[in-house]
Amino acid sequence: MAQWGLSSRQSVYNILMKYDFDTIIDRRGTDSLKYDFARERGKPQDVLPMWVADMDFPAPQEILDDIRQAADRRVFGYTEPKDGYYEAVANWFGSRHGYNVTPHETIKTPGVVFALAHAVRAFTEPGESVMVQTPVYYPFFDVIRDNGRTLVANPLVYNNGKYSIDFADFEKKIVEHNVKLFILCSPHNPVGRVWTREELSAMNDICVKHDVIIISDEIHCDFIWPGHKHICFRLLNENAIVATAPSKTFNLAGLQTSNIFVKNEDLRRKLKTEIVRSGYHQLNVFGLAACQSAYAKGAAWLDELKEYLLENIRTAREFLAKRLPKIKLVEPESTYLLWLDFSDYELSQSELDRRLTEGAKLWLSSGTIFGAEGEGFQRVNIACPKATLVEALGRLEKEFGLKA
């Protein structure tokens, strides 16, 4: 396995990189959800965790320096950002994704899921229907059901290793269940799809036809792989609500800062009112500093990170094809989360999960937490030093290569 992980391509590339993504940081004993809660989550203590979507890379030094500068002020009172914050956010999404946002339409929240929960309450009444496309990021289910709304699923179609949308079912479900709100995952987690303009337009036309409000969770939009292009939903529909955050892009989830773009004044007023009802106002001072710093100074770091992640994806793709061909990689168009199809092993989900945790000593995200359509799948986070990925692949081969 050591030889597999030391490609000359990777070695030469690392020499040219400014930022270090190879150093393994010991996160155990830091109250890390990813590393320190195996026992509490019912997993063996010695599993290698590759489940939750945070990266094992340090944040860019530029961000760390700005956080330290904020800490050096020594007084941590209530904080609101000035123009520099909004300029950094607007410049990032304007230059990277081709759409303009203003401070007036930007609602700051401590997380995208927080915003989704408040949007569900702001735009629907108890018992009304909210639609998602399964298999999908599982907190979507919680913000719908836990707020007393009806979850409606438009399952994605899996065929020949790729996912697509069943538009006939999409409209049928909207009409039959009188759907009021649609939460789109774009790019899609966990299946890694980057929706095309044609697909987005078709969904938009149906939603507009039936007066369905659209919220597009675009938290993974900065990780788009070659041959694909992310299209922000608001470029198709100015009334669409777009949820973003620097958390996935720059590994800042613990600082809890998100930016929700709502151009429609009525929708923005309703969402703000619902957030105020919760008693939440100013964000964390360090989260605000980190967000501004990330969007103002993080471009070079991200560009190098994406090259490193592409190499990790290539490593996983080649390893699975040569050594574990029964594990099918759903080719990722986006994100650092790989969606693996184990269905050729004909195992129940519980047995698959058991063999991964007890046999391979790997902690992945079980497919069925994303919905019933995830049966036979696992999601794995490859945003880690290559040595960690190689170790994980070796554990997979030891468990599934010899016993297949």
Image (cartoon, rainbow, N blue to C red):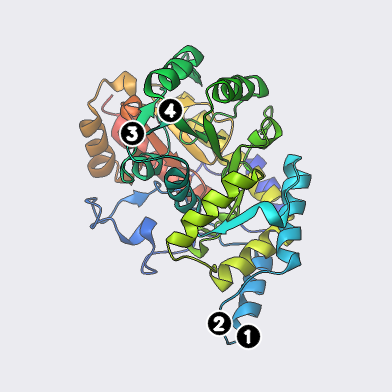
Query: Circle 1 sits on which residue?
Result: 73
Neighbor class of circle 2 (other Cα within 10 Å; few <14, some 14-19, many 20+) is few
Location of the N terminus (image quadrant) = top left
Instruction: Give percent across and percent down for residue 155.
Output: 41, 22
First-in-chain label (4 vs 2): 2
Instruction: Give percent across and percent down for residue 31.
Output: 36, 67
Neighbor class of circle 3 (other Cα within 10 Å; few <14, some 14-19, many 20+) is some
297 vs 267, nearest the viewer: 267
Query: Circle 2 sits on which residue?
Result: 76
* Horizontal relation, residue 403 to residue 227: left or right: left
CB atoms at circles 3 and 2 under 8 Å apart? no
Query: Element at badge 1?
Result: loop
Amino acid at the residue labelled 4: Val
CA distance separating discs 1 and 4: 49 Å
Instruction: Give percent across and percent down for residue 329.
Output: 47, 27
Neighbor class of circle 4 (other Cα within 10 Å; few <14, some 14-19, many 20+) is many
CB atoms at circles 4 and 2 under 8 Å apart? no
Is residue 402 visible in this depiction of the protein?
yes
Amino acid at the residue labelled 3: Thr
Query: Circle 3 sits on which residue?
Result: 150
CB atoms at circles 1 and 2 under 8 Å apart? yes
CA distance separating discs 4 and 2: 44 Å
Instruction: Give percent across and percent down for residue 397.
Output: 36, 34
Direction bottom: furthest residue: 74
Q: Nearer the viewer, mark 1 or mark 4?
A: 4
Query: Element at badge 4?
Result: strand
